[in-house]
């Protein structure tokens, strides 16, 4: 058998398992039409989230005791739940100030931790950095962490509300 | 580039915009930011309308008979 006929035979083996009907379905026009469909589907997918947001109620932001000033040393943090069961983080900064934020990363909701050495809040999932003012500094997150409003009374720290947007 | 090419560029831009708007909507949903969600939804729905118009335009060009 000549080399040419061997090659032809090998090629025919390669195309035997292809379905011509399937190939026809995956043409350029079908692909472009699917892309139009995908664009419409992505746009309409925002509607169910708005309906769900309309139906659900925001958790109550009542005054809630967190801890005492003495219990949390400078440079340390404490996890608590506020409002409702939402995870939050109270941080005693090195300058003596207390700050608290919801500690779900605004990128993909991973928990955010306080890193004392760098004085930042870090999301370890994708290395998202937030400053101690809650603003995103580096990595994928684009939004600030929701701020928990605090009140200190007689050495006791209370959460009294929440601000989603709290500026730079 | 012809009209067909421009319409496809438009499609890619609208598709990418809707993808980002959906991500922003989900992020806002997680933090109870309802005002932003509404805004993103309105823009996304307008984009859907534009995609529909673009589709009709593209079809007209794509399936026209050449003289």
Image (cartoon, coloured by chain):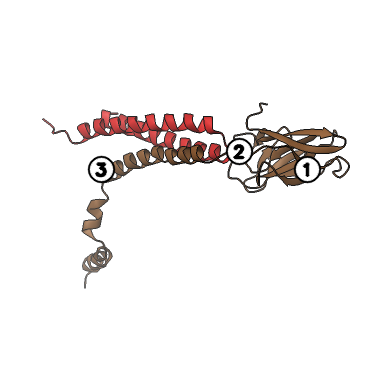
Chain colours: A brown, B red
CA–CA distance between discs 2 and 3?
A: 37 Å
Q: Mark 1 or mark 3: name the one nearer the start of the chain.
A: 3
> Residue A101's x, y, as percent?
70, 38
Relative to B11, is B27 on the left or the right? right
Name the secondary structure under disc 3: helix
* Residue, disc 2: A141
Name the secondary structure under disc 1: strand
Q: Residue A29: which numbered mark, if any? A: 3
Label 2 close to label 1 by CB (< 8 Å): no
* Residue, disc 1: A66
> Residue A109's x, y, as percent?
60, 45
Query: Of the residues tagged 1 and 3, which is closer to the observer?
Result: 1
Quarter where residue A31 is shown: top left
CA–CA distance between discs 1 and 3?
A: 60 Å
Residue that appears at 50% across and 33% down: B37
Query: Of the residues tagged 2 and 1, which is closer to the observer?
Result: 1
Q: Residue A10: which numbered mark, if any? A: none
Give whichever of B42, B5 is nearer the camera: B42
Q: Mark 2 or mark 3: name the one nearer the start of the chain.
A: 3
Identify the image quadrant of the C terminus of chain A.
top right
Residue A88 in view (yes/no): yes
Q: Mark 2 or mark 1: name the one nearer the start of the chain.
A: 1
> Residue A67's x, y, as percent?
81, 43
Name the secondary structure under disc 2: loop
Classify mark 2: residues with Cα within 10 Å, few (<14), some (14-19) or many (20+): many
Relative to A161, is A10 on the left or the right? left
Relative to B28, is B62 on the left or the right? left
């Amino acid at each position: 058998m000549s080399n040419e006929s061997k090659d032809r035979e090998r090629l025919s083996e390669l195309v035997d398992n292809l379905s011509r009907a399937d190939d026809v379905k995956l043409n350029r026009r079908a692909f472009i039409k699917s892309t139009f469909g995908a664009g419409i589907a992505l746009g309409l997918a925002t509607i169910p989230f708005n309906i769900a947001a309309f139906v659900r109620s925001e958790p109550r932001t009542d005054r809630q005791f967190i801890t005492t000033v003495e219990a949390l040393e400078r440079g340390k943090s404490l996890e608590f739940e506020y409002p409702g069961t939402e995870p939050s983080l109270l941080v005693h900064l090195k300058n003596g100030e207390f700050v608290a934020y919801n500690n779900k990363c605004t990128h993909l909701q991973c928990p955010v931790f306080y890193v004392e050495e760098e004085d930042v809040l870090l999301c370890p999932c994708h290395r998202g950095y937030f400053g101690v003012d809650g603003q995103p500094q580096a990595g994928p997150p684009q939004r600030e962490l929701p701020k928990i409003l605090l009140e200190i009374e007689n050495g006791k720290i209370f959460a009294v509300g929440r601000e989603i947007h709290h500026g730079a | 580039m012809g009209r067909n090419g421009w319409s496809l560029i438009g499609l890619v831009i609208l598709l990418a915009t809707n993808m980002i708007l959906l991500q922003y909507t989900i992020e806002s949903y997680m933090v109870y930011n309802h005002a932003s969600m509404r805004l993103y939804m309105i823009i996304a729905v307008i984009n859907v309308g534009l995609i529909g118009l673009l589709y009709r335009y593209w079809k007209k060009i794509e399936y026209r008979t050449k003289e």
